[in-house]
Image (spheres, grey):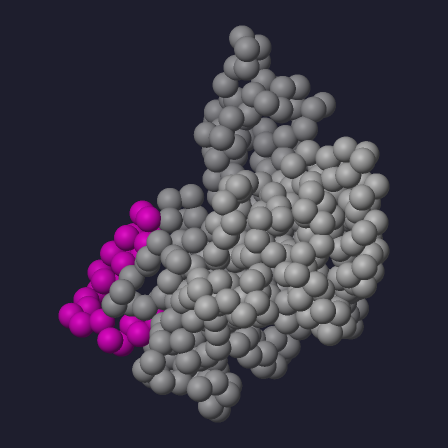
Amino acid sequence: MPLVAIVGRPNVGKSTLFNRLTRSRASIVHDEPGVTRDRVYGRAFWSDREFSVIDTGGFVPNSADRFEEAIREQVMIAIEEADALLFVVDTTTGITDLDDSMAEMLRRTGKPVLLVANKADNQERRWETSTFYQLGVGDVFPVSAINGSGTGELLDELVAQLPPDDSRTADDHRLRVAVVGRPNVGKSSLVNALLGEERSIVTEISGTTRDAIHTDLKFEGRDILLVDTAGLRKRSRVSENVEFYSTLRTERALEEADIAVLLIDAVDGLTMQDIRVLKQAEEAGKGIVLGVNKWDALQEKDTLTTRNYERSIYDRLQTMDYVPIVFISAITKQRIYRLMQTVLEVEAERRKRISTSKMNDFLQEALERSKPPTFRNRFVRIKYVTQVKHEPPVFAFFCNHPRGIREPYQRYLENRLREAFGFRGVPIKLLFKQK
């Protein structure tokens, strides 16, 4: 997806605008300047276009303050990576020296820059925004991020400035597989083992891979674009700017992938960070395979070790027990080809289409086993179901009271659906609509 960076000096309302565009409260809003120190990521939708948004900290050039220096460097990285920039200024204070400095820097990028005159909460302030044309970065868009006025016109122009959605051309049939995971779990070793060559640098130092490395692989007659990504770690621990850059590239690689292969270390086991990545892939509708690497390093294995290890993982994943697990060793090449076969199987499941007649036979059987609970003392009746999308699969259930289908019954229907049709390794979405 295209990437949009929100930039500007401290306390002009960047975080408020971010929350408005992403329809969230992910970014902290406070009157005190400098509250946003880390980058906050989100997704926005407008006019059938989806794009990623980064809220950056307030830009202060030539400051000796260590926080402001770190923020400045990371703002520069965000600007370098972005496809378009939203330059936010404050209508109530007019043009400042910091605005001038940032405008000069943004003009040199050659990227689309939209000047957002924030806090234009009334007609008089909207008239005053014309003074910002002096900054020489293009058209001025008066908005009020706090109440949303003017954001429609801003977004119309923004999506017009974004690059076309050409991430995959019509004749590009390659399966896109992103190898993700925490630092030093063996992602580069796995890619090198599959390719039979040292494509990625491998050391015992975590975080050696700083960028997302794309490589073509042919496996069982299928063209695959394999992406070896930098190690993901909690953002609170991403202290080096180069790691921020790596994390950004990794998240974008995950967005563009068809299948996500999450590698974990057999000795360390599944961590909360791994679960977060799995949830991120699930929300994005990606196929998911969990690879347990360094299986050869695990001592004292017996015939039950694999089964017990799987059970412990599924106990922690709870609702994601549909994710296949493959135990591998990238160093000895143990089961690495089985891992890729599983990737192809998951891709086939992701493309699967179920006929409406079969879906309604399934529904009839599921309703006979367990009927929906009543809603406001009324019976909930599901009339029929059909698959409305694949890659990932989406199913629409038509009923008289959609709000009466609570989460436990939704989970029941999903479990029955998986029992009937599989969808191993594939997130599925259930929609409930009024009939």
Question: Residue 266 at x, y = what percent?
Answer: 29, 67
Q: Tell me the quarter of the picture where residue 263 sits.
A: bottom left
Rendered position, 331 above or below 233: below
Residue at 67 percent of width and 56 percent of height: 96
Question: Residue 378 at x, y = what percent?
Answer: 57, 10
Residue at 77 percent of width and 39 percent of height: 125
Say left or right for 150 vs 242: right
Image quarter (top left, top right, bottom left or bottom right) of the C terminus: top right
Furthest residue toward bottom: 197
Question: Residue 323 at x, y = what percent?
Answer: 45, 55
Residue at 29 percent of width and 72 percent of height: 295
Q: Tell me the quarter of the picture where residue 262 sits.
A: bottom left
Say left or right for 154 vs 407: right
Front in this rendered view, residue 254 or 164: 164
Front in this rendered view, residue 310 or 33: 33
Say left or right for 112 vs 350: right
Regarding residue 353, the answer to whether it shows in the image is no
Rendered position, 316 above or below 59: above
Magenta-drawn stretch contains 298: yes
Residue at 55 percent of width and 49 percent of height: 283
Furthest residue toward top: 377
Q: Which region shows up in magenta?
A: 293-316
Question: Residue 71 at x, y = what percent?
Answer: 51, 63
The number of callouts visible is: 0
Regarding residue 370, the answer to whether it shows in the image is yes
